[in-house]
Image: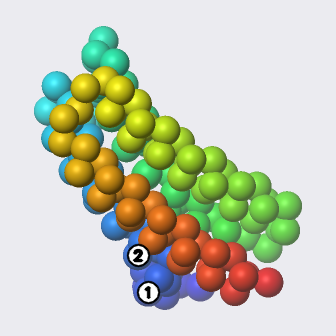
Amino acid sequence: MSNKNLKQLPIYKKAMDLCIMSREIASYVSLNKDLLKLYQSNSHRDCIADSLLTDAILIPQKIVQVEFSNCTSERLDNLTFINIMLRNINSYCLGLEKDGVKEVEYLNLLRIEIRSFRKQYKKWKISLN
């Protein structure tokens, strides 16, 4: 599968949507507006935002690895990893709420995006067999 075809995959598009939304939310909720330096912050909220960004960025990378791998166990490991990242992102939403983010509607939009991604993920996973 070429890089161009990969970008046409609905699951990849959904993963990129998840990345974009996660980046926007991290930027909005973080006290440090330099997203590349969130990991250096002592703020709990910035740490959560950094983790949210990191996990969202890893999902499309894992999709690429699944698509290009011929090894069944490697594919399964990456599929499992994607599920873990999705659970983590849901946990980060809860963590941001508990940390006092007042704009819960943004976090709820991200949760909706995760549910939408999961539906696409299930279709994609079936298509791999």
In the image, what residue occupies the spot 32% across and 53% down? Answer: 108
**Is residue 27 visible to us here?**
no
Label 1 sits on a secondary structure element that is helix
Sooner in the amino-acid sequence: mark 1 or mark 2: 1
Q: Residues within 10 Å of mark 2 (few under 14, many from 20)?
A: some
Q: Is residue 25 above or below residue 100?
A: below
Q: Residues within 10 Å of mark 1 (few under 14, many from 20)?
A: few
- The disc at residue 13 is 2
Residue 33 percent coordinates (x, y): 14, 33
Q: CA distance from mark 1 to mark 2?
A: 7 Å
Q: 107 or 26, which lies in front?
A: 107
The answer to whether residue 81 is left or right of residue 111 is right
Q: Is residue 34 above or below residue 108?
A: above
Q: Are marks 1 and 2 in contact (CB under 8 Å)?
A: yes
The answer to whether residue 103 is left or right of residue 115 is left
Residue 26, by quadrant, is top left
Label 2 sits on a secondary structure element that is helix
Q: 109 or 36, which lies in front?
A: 109
Q: Is residue 97 above or below residue 20?
A: above
Residue 45 percent coordinates (x, y): 30, 25
Which numbered mark, 1 or 2, is in the foreground of this view? 2
Three-letter amino acid code of the residue under disc 1: Gln
Residue 31 percent coordinates (x, y): 16, 25
The answer to whether residue 44 is left or right of residue 5 is left
In the image, what residue occupies the spot 19% across and 35% down? Answer: 102
Residue position for label 1: 8
Residue 75 percent coordinates (x, y): 75, 65
Three-letter amino acid code of the residue under disc 2: Lys
Q: Where the C terminus falls, by quadrant?
A: bottom right
In the image, what residue occupies the spot 49% across and 83% down? Answer: 9
**Is residue 91 visible to us here?**
yes
